[in-house]
């Protein structure tokens, strides 16, 4: 019997917490005030339980860690050579590359050497945009595009400092079998 009355009390408190009071519920104002004060005590106790005990040392350690964070990668605009670097997205539909490198028939090692040399020379001569034809990989074992993956990897890692924008070439220049690259000159 006690268990049932305890459940009824919990259910009743739940209804009161959520603003529902049945019509047949006749509570005196004194009891309302008592219940409200009990609710406040319960809320305070819940807040005490939910709050973790942070010490002053923890706070100092956290603040020093925040001071040492490098947030330059998270900003949309960053300073590069004293200029504000904004997003550069050219219209590549009608682009005409000034120089082209065709990697068909090269090994992976030779292709990497050629890509590095080609991009370096084009940057020295301030030539942009350029086209690197790597093929779609249909002649590779298991149809995996080895040279395409190599070019994309180079662009994302070592070449990112030299490259302003890169994308698959338009269909008339090779589509997904070539990359059009704008160098940062």
Image (cartoon, rainbow, N blue to C red):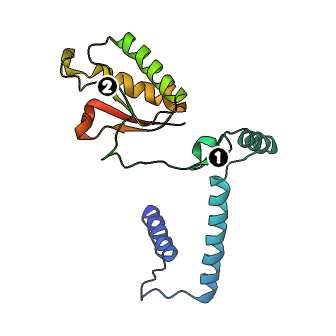
Residue under label 1, please give it.
Answer: 83
Q: Name the one closer to the observer, 34 or 90.
A: 90
Describe the element under mark 1 as helix, strand or loop. Answer: strand
Point 52% across, 31% down: residue? 162
Q: Name the one closer to the observer, 110 or 37.
A: 110
Point 36% across, 36% down: residue? 97
Q: Quadrant of residue 169?
A: top left
Q: Quadrant of residue 100?
A: top left
- Residue 112 pos. (x, y %): 41, 16
Instruction: Tell which tag, 2 or 1, sits nearer the viewer.
Output: 1
- The correct choice, above or below, for 184 with respect to 90 in the image is above
Residue under label 2, please give it.
Answer: 148
Q: Mark 1 Cα within 10 Å, few/some/many (few <14, many 20+)? A: few
Q: Could you tell me which quadrant the N terminus lies in?
A: bottom left
Q: Tally the marks.
A: 2
Point 65% across, 59% down: residue? 47
Describe the element under mark 2 as helix, strand or loop. Answer: helix
Q: CA distance from mark 2 to mark 1?
A: 32 Å
- Residue 35 pos. (x, y %): 60, 76
- Residue 5 pos. (x, y %): 46, 68
- Residue 161 pos. (x, y %): 55, 31
Q: Name the one closer to the observer, 27 or 70.
A: 70
Left or right: residue 163 versus residue 41 is left
Q: Quadrant of residue 60?
A: top right
């Amino acid at each position: 019997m006690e268990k049932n009355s305890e459940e009824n009390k919990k259910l009743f408190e739940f209804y009161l917490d959520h603003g529902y009071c049945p019509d047949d519920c006749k509570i005196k104002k004194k009891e309302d005030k008592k219940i409200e004060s009990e609710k406040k005590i319960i809320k305070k106790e819940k807040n005490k339980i939910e709050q973790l005990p942070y010490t002053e040392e923890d706070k100092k350690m956290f603040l020093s860690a925040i001071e040492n964070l490098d947030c330059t990668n998270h900003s949309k605009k960053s300073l590069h050579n004293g200029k504000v670097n904004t997003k550069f997205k050219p219209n590549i539909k009608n682009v005409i590359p000034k120089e082209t490198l065709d990697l068909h028939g090269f090994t992976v090692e030779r292709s990497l050497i050629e890509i590095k040399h080609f991009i370096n020379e084009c940057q020295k001569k301030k030539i942009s945009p350029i086209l690197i034809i790597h093929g779609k990989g249909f002649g590779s074992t298991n149809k995996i595009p080895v040279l395409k993956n190599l070019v994309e990897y180079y662009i994302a890692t070592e070449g990112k400092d030299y490259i302003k924008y890169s994308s698959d070439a338009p269909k008339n220049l090779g589509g997904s079998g070539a990359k059009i690259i704008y160098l940062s000159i």
